[in-house]
Amino acid sequence: MKKDEICIGILIAIGLIWGNIFEAQSQVVDEATKNEYYVAAYIWPSCHDDPLAREKLWPDGIGEWEVIKKGNPRYEGHYQPRQPLWGYELDNDPEVVERWIDVAVDHGVNVFVYDWYWYEGGPYLESALNDGFLKANNNHKMQFYIMWANHDVKHNYWNYHRYGDDASILWDAKVDWENYKIIVDRVINQYFKQPNYFKINGEPVFSIFSIDKLKESFGGSIEETRKALDYFRDEVQKAGFPGLHIQWNQGGGSLMSEEKAREFKKNVDSMGFNSVAMYNMGGMTEDYLVYGANSVKIREQMNEILDVPVFPCVSIGWDDTPRFPKKGIKDTVHYHNTPRSFAMLLSKAKEYADRHPGQTKLITINAWNEWVEGSYLLPDMLHGFDYLEAVREVFIDKKQDRY
């Protein structure tokens, strides 16, 4: 065989190898985007040792587990403290997150939405995403996006054991233009460029929790806030994406008067938001079924008001008593708060998605691991895997679709 033929053969072989590698990578990304339903669980990344958190909030080095462990029952039958089946795992441990991903995907959860923070001119609690999720060997199986949780924090909000009645502001979430530009650059290059970042029509999804605080960052002006969001869009396009999908996160929301509804629509339209989602169900009451019915009414009203997609949210429950010593039974959801009721609300959210074929079938769940607020999918000592099984029943087994 001639030398040049050998060289050609080697080049062909190398080409085939690289071709197979690129094809495999493409298949990994493609498989992650072929879901009929995008079931997205919020992650509250508080349970690890963050330097700023250790200094200002949780000195024990285990993050908010320090507070969660101190939960105490406030009434007969009150399930406190919550007891995780897998123990007090650190959410920035990639081996922990690998198990999370496996159990999530097996049960129909295919997107994680990470709460993301920026305080004192830098990121906060970011290690859960950077070191936990992004270093998990199986993270290609799970898409993710981030919700900028740009809300103020009072001293005693996340650790009243340390601060008692001190309700003064610990962190103001307002940012200036300099910090905003750093945030935009960081988010684009650190997250949007990940192959498994969640996109709608090719556009990275970026959710914003507090629109009021966003406006405050830009002088309280809708026009200036729109300029800031347009700057973000331009930078995303410069990075090679077709655009940016900016999601208004409504928190829980509530039924609005006609005047409030008009103002809401005006703000969504004027600032150019692409969709509206919720962090948890609005209309909280002690009865989970009433809570769910209230949230459906709120969702339907928003859908009627707006011209952009409204994505449904289903909460697992609500009990943030570990954070607040004066809260009691009336501040928790405790009637009919069962995995079966949760499954029924999930089926209603799925029906809503099916009735809106023109929009991405995204359903959010509060939450993956909100132990301190009593709303989590992760298995615990009381319910085991029942809440995860409820997700599987609705979105994989599709039991309700048979009739």
Image (cartoon, grey):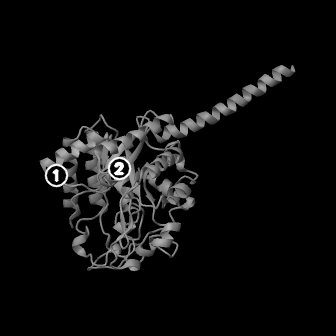
Instruction: Name the amino acid, label 2.
Output: Phe
Q: Residues within 10 Å of mark 2 (few under 14, many from 20)?
A: some
Up/down of 284 relative to 241, above or below: below
The answer to whether residue 205 of the structure is visible from this angle is yes
> Can you give x and y, in whole percent of width and height, for residue 202 in the image?
44, 35
Q: Nearer the viewer, mark 1 or mark 2?
A: 2
The N terminus lies in quadrant? top right
Determine crowd level at label 1: few under 14, some 14-19, many 20+ residues with C-alpha closer than 10 A: some
Q: Nearer the viewer, residue 99 or 52?
A: 52
Label 2 secondary element: loop
Amino acid type indicated by mark 1: Met
Q: Is residue 48 above or below residue 116?
A: below
Residue 137, position in %: x, y?
A: 58, 52
Relative side of 281 to 48, left or right: left
Residue 294 percent across, percent down from the top left:
19, 56
Residue for badge 1: 256
Tell me the residue at 29%/52% (across/down): 250
Left or right: 225 as drawn, with respect to 3: left
Q: Secondary structure at mark 1?
A: loop
Tell me the tag on residue 61. none
* Residue indicated by mark 2: 218
The residue lying at 44 percent from left, 38 percent from top is 34
Q: Is residue 351 left or right of residue 187?
A: left
- Which residue shows up at 44% across the image and 43% down it? 198
